Amino acid sequence: MLDGREIVLGVTGSIAAYKAVLVLRELTAAGARVTVCLSGNARHFVGPLTFRTLSGRPVLDDLFDPQSDAAVEHVAIAERAHAVLVAPATANVLAKAAHGIADDALTTLLLAARCPVLMAPAMDGGMWDHPAVTENVATLRRRGVTVLEPDSGALASGLSGKGRLPEPAAILEALRRVLTPVRDLAGERVLVTAGPTREPIDPVRYISNRSSGKMGYRLAAAAFRRGAEVVLVSGPTAIAPPSGVTFVPVETAEEMREAVLRHAGAATIVVKAAAVADYRTKAPSATKIKGKHDLTLELTPNPDILREVAATARGAFVVGFAAETHDVAANAQAKLAAKGVDLLVVNDVSQRGIGFEAEDNEVALLDRWGGHRALPRMPKAEVAEAILSHVVALRAARPRRVSI
Ligand code: CTP
């Protein structure tokens, strides 16, 4: 599977660096040709000789030593690598990579690399949960770097928590996935909605909700990577649309409805991750509302776009989302039936750290054939992959709905 693949194994200064030796053994046993690149601090934990002996190749370590292989070779090695794997990746290397700092052989090579990059973090004592680390990981993931979740358990300091290097077998499996992109949506036309809608009150104010659009954008990006033609209809968000998708920006629920119905006819899969405002103001003011007096807004319900698409786009597989804060299971079951969708992705938005605005999500998948699958808490990019894999599996197992 890794036969003949050129892999750069980056090792950084963590006590888990000794496990990089096991990762190297597994890589070479799987047929990979491995060049080891040490960060400035890695050699405090395991010496270059160990890696040189086991890889059978020179080790890149000191960028500024004219005698070192790293001084001349790091760009050429980055160019011919099929993947760069950093294991263990310390909080320090995550920060440097996120900010484009290149102050040693490994970080310089990471900037030069144009191949997939996989990072397997390891760190002690709650560092993984520090907001700085969370933001750096989010930045790297947004740029397409695969950052694995560390394992939980006993840490080197004697503390217990999340921060252990994932097992070498799990790292290798992730590397295989990175190197063999799945193209199981080739030929599909996927319509994704994302973000909130904004319903104007007057020219400067609006009603909206806390949706960031991240879940829908991750779904659109994942569907594109897996070979689909993707249309992304999005309410206003602060994030850049993924490259490769046809982007249709909208503002209000009515604009979203119009755009969705325009594209749904051609879609084979519709995923409605948008948080559509349920109400709009009945008569938005044409001028800015002035004064400090009590104000009553008269609201009127917006059209239910999902229900309309599920009823009309009969050839498409329709996926809806359910944002619930209470009685989650019962509400979700009722919503699955009421909306007439094939699959409902349910999240409990009352929980901190998942759902609206968060980087992670924890969802359950309910399908119209009675299936129920709870997924663990994961980064939204991984949730997106899991949802799409579930759609592919359900479509293979279940006949399509057809017009009669
Ligand atoms: N949805 C839609 N049009 C609306 C409201 C919701 O298409 N006017 C879609 C959303 O994109 C999502 C699903 O319906 O896929 C469920 O949204 P949610 O806000 O959870 O449910 P609601 O239908 O708004 O019901 P409730 O507010 O009662 O929970």
Image (spheres, rainbow, N blue to C red):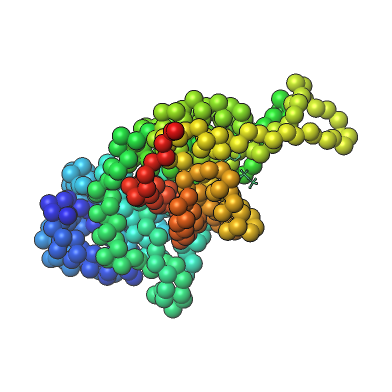
- How many numbered badges does the structure rendering display? 0
Q: Is residue 59 left or right of residue 263?
A: left
Which sits in the foreground, 64 or 265? Answer: 265
Q: Residue furthest top?
A: 286
Q: Residue at x 24, y 54 (%)?
A: 176
Taking depth in this image into account, of 225 and 145 the one nearest to the observer is 225
Q: Nearer the viewer, residue 173 or 127?
A: 173
- Taking the image as drawn, is residue 97 in sight? no
Question: Which residue is situated farthest in the front direction here?
Answer: 404
Most distant residue in the right direction: 293
- Tell me the quarter of the picture where residue 252 sits: top right
Residue 277 shows in this picture: yes
192 over 133 or under it: above or below: above
Horizontally, residue 397 falls left or right of residue 136, namely left
On-image quarter of the C terminus: top left
Q: Report x, y in % for residue 171.
A: 29, 61
**Residue drawn 60% across the image and 36% down it:** 304
Where's ligand 1: which quadrant? top right
Question: What residue lies at 45% left-to-right and 52% top-to-bottom?
Answer: 369
Where does the image place residue 285, in percent across and percent down from the top left?
Answer: 77, 24
Q: Quadrant of residue 87?
A: bottom left
| In the image: residue 104, left or right of residue 222 | left
Q: Residue at coordinates 58% horizontally, 27% vertically from top-left?
A: 255
Quadrant for the N terminus in the image:
bottom left
Q: Residue furthest toward the bottom? A: 158
* Residue 150 placement (x, y as % from top left): 39, 63
Q: Position of residue 133 (x, y in %)?
A: 47, 56
